[in-house]
Image (cartoon, rainbow, N blue to C red):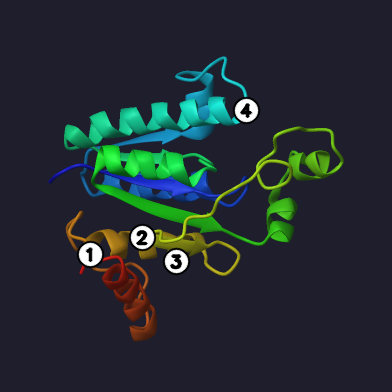
Amino acid sequence: MRGFTLWFTGLPCSGKSTLAEAIYETLLERGMKVEMLDGDEVRKNLSKGLGYSKEDRDTNIRRIGWVCKILTRNDVIAIGAAISPYSAIREENRKAIGRFVEVYVTAPIEVLMERDVKGLYKKALAGEIENFTGVNDPYEAPENPEVLCETDKESIDESVQKILRTLELMGYIPKIEAEVDYSAEEEEKIKSRLKDLGYI
């Protein structure tokens, strides 16, 4: 099986890491070669010392993209989970990697604030934190992601199955019996999105 990159993007507390970890575990259970690069972990190791200016954010995302490219080239499934707020750098990574599947994880700001146990959104809104994505620093949402996960409307399992079904339809992973049965309408939505993007 050829490698590919599964790239999770979205605002803080949208559910990127939760979904990425769930997909990672599922693919491991299926016997696939898979590695995960979580944004927070990368900042502690690969990008230690970088701040949150646009230049530093771009450098961080380029570094994650470079590792994903190497893994993909060596037939490993690379999972990247980082806010990656700027569309130009995401597209740069897409072009460099080639086999690139973007998962946009989203929920309304009110829901994100409710999930924010550290209170970072409130601090940013109060002016106590600078360059906080979605409050005082921009987030450029993907216009044509391969997968859209609305985590205020879907359970974790539903989002995971949507991602897996998309990868199956793209021919990136072998098809197996779904753990969650989708309605014909939901299945058609997934197929329609992939048709619009030119995959099927």
**From the viewer's perspective, is the residue at label 1 or at label 4 nearer?**
4
Q: In the visual, does 108 lie left or right of 61?
A: right
| Sequence-first tag of 4 and 3 | 4
Which class describes the residues within 10 Å of circle 2: few (<14), some (14-19), or many (20+)?
A: many
Instruction: Name the residue rendered at 52%, 67% in the picture.
Output: 154
Q: Residue 53 carries which label?
A: 4
Among the 4 quarters of the image, the one containing residue 125: top right
Residue 110 at x, y = what percent? 74, 59
Element assignment for label 3: helix
Q: What residue type is labelled 2?
A: Glu
| Mark 1, residue position | 199
- Front position in the image: 108 or 76: 108
Q: Residue 158 carries which label?
A: 3
Element assignment for label 2: loop
Res. 129 in view: yes
Q: In the visual, does 172 lie left or right of 85?
A: left
**From the viewer's perspective, is the residue at label 2 or at label 4 nearer?**
4
**Could you tell me if the residues under marks 1 and 4 are in contact, i.e. CB atoms within 8 Å?**
no
Q: Residue furthest bottom?
A: 184
Which class describes the residues within 10 Å of circle 1: few (<14), some (14-19), or many (20+)?
A: few
